[in-house]
Image (cartoon, coloured by chain):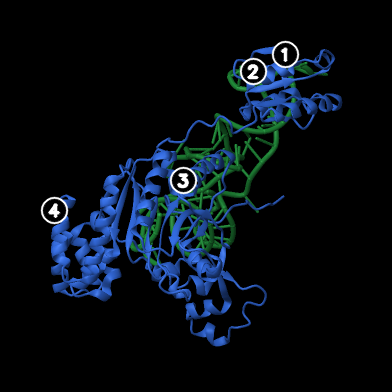
Amino acid sequence: MADQKPSIPKGTRDFSPVEMMRRNFIFDIIKEVFQRYGYLPIETPAMENLSTLTGKYGEEGDRLLFKILNSGDYLKKTSIEDFESPNLNKLAAKISEKGLRYDLTVPFARYVVQNRNDITFPFKRYQIQPVWRADRPQKGRYREFYQCDVDVIGSNSLINEVELVLIIDEVFDKLGINTIIKINNRKILSGIAEVIGEADKMIDITVAIDKLDKIGLEKVNEELEAKGLSKQAIEKLQPILNLEGILKEKFPKLKEILKNSKIGMEGIEELMTMLTHLKDLNLKNKWRFDLTLARGLNYYTGAIFEVVAKDIKFGSICGGGRYDDLTGIFGLPEVSGVGISFGADRVYDVMNELNLFPEESSITSKVMFVNFGKEEEKFCLKLIKEIRQAGISAELYPDSVKMKKQMKYANNKNIPYVVLVGENEMKNNLITVKDMQSGEQTETSLKEFIEKVL
RNA sequence: GUGCCUAUAGCUCAGUUGGUUAGAGCAUCGGAUUGUGGUUCCGAGGGUCGUGGGUUCAAAUCCCAUUAGGCACCCCA
């Protein structure tokens, strides 16, 4: 048999039972918190029309979209010229009209617009599904990964932002991860761009600023210059990048710098309101205003968030922000939304490296019955039914094979009790219970056994 | 999209300056033990050395190409 080795695509993973138990542990906590804050679940398809997805994530995002080849004769819309002059984007549009979703926010915006008549606003939903990105995988980066999104759409209130931070705080507290919640506001960044006279280069500026603590001031300036910012603009930016000190000192300085920018002052106001609330709410995790937080996604317009684990160097494990006009693109203007997304896979990796998962005790059957043959099978099934009805997970080894094999199975599966019912036990209406940990073996009645295990 | 590294049994890896029939541990299966696992002992199966080409009397080993995987950058959860 010259069978080829099976494998899965780069950047995707299988999950074993143990891994799934742990992943579900994370999902359950997140879901529970989301629902306790009044958010309800929805799901959307794995694939969307490409027109829904393209242009929402910036140039980089478009490149990372997985495109789905049209079914049937996917070349029928193409012509010879398409292949002679290789304009890949144009060609791609002709042979592919669907793509795998890149995040959950854009499909959500599409959902809201499409179902606007059936939705009561403000609409609070959560969504836990995989997303796909055609990125080169590396540590903490996958091509298929789960996001856990909570968004509220149709409300401008900053209470939403505050509550989202509370959700972040509660989730990570429950998971046992110490985090730093970084908060900023895109309006402040816009204001800065405006003040230094480069309003249209907002994105480039923010992306560069974002790297400040990673590559340092000098490199940031280099990058800004490379992006075409004027010398004067970069000069003007320096005092802002050098803003140091605690909030109390930073804020007045920032206010002074932004005083001529309407949007900048708006951002300051918003941030102030949020931070004042948060101060009163005694969060368990650290949080702070971080001027260098920018976030790459194009659609954010107001508050932005990012969460990193404190005890380990890893990318961000949660991020989000306010988007004022995402639904506008789909024909429903002036509806603002705000939301965050937990990266389940990175949360998993962080918890795994920090050993934060609880001991798995209930992941397997509590009891296994050894299979001695046809007659015993019949007898045992009745006993097992009773055990299961008592709420104890139990199984009968399905085949009457060598005892050694059956015991080994129980051992490998970490089943704590093995029950043996053969001729003698059936006659006396008793069961023999082997405690797999101690190796001790006792004869007892079914009733007594159930009581003991419970 | 750019750069670097790796590829030998199901898994993790050894394999000398190129030299007989390519090894180990784990896992699997069988036996010691037909109603007793985890420990122990004995045994077995499992490989076109990622693929294709080249150099050589001789290639897992050297060279080229190709494919796949990993890491870093970019960007991001």
Q: For the residues marked 2 and 3, what is the alpha-carbon distance in whole angstroms?
A: 35 Å
Mark 3: give few (<14), some (14-19) or many (20+) Cα within 10 Å. some
Name which residue lies at 56% across and 66% down: A118
Q: Quadrant of residue A158?
A: bottom left
Which residue is the site of mark 4? A249
The residue type indicated by label 1 comes to: Thr
The CA distance from mark 1 to mark 3 is 44 Å
Tell whether label 1 touches label 2 (CB within 8 Å).
yes
Q: Which residue is mark 2?
A: A452
Residue labelled with disc 1: A444
User: Where A100 falls versus A248 (above or below)?
Assistant: below
In front of the other: A38 or A424: A38
Amino acid on which disc 3 is placed: Val
Q: Are marks 2 and 3 on the same chain?
A: yes
Q: Position of residue A444 (x, y in %)?
A: 72, 13
Q: Is residue B55 above or below residue A14?
A: below
Q: Colour of chain B?
A: green
Q: Secondary structure at mark 1?
A: strand
- Chain under numbered label 4: A
**Chain of residue at mark 2:** A
Q: Secondary structure at mark 3?
A: helix
Q: Dot 3 falls on which chain?
A: A
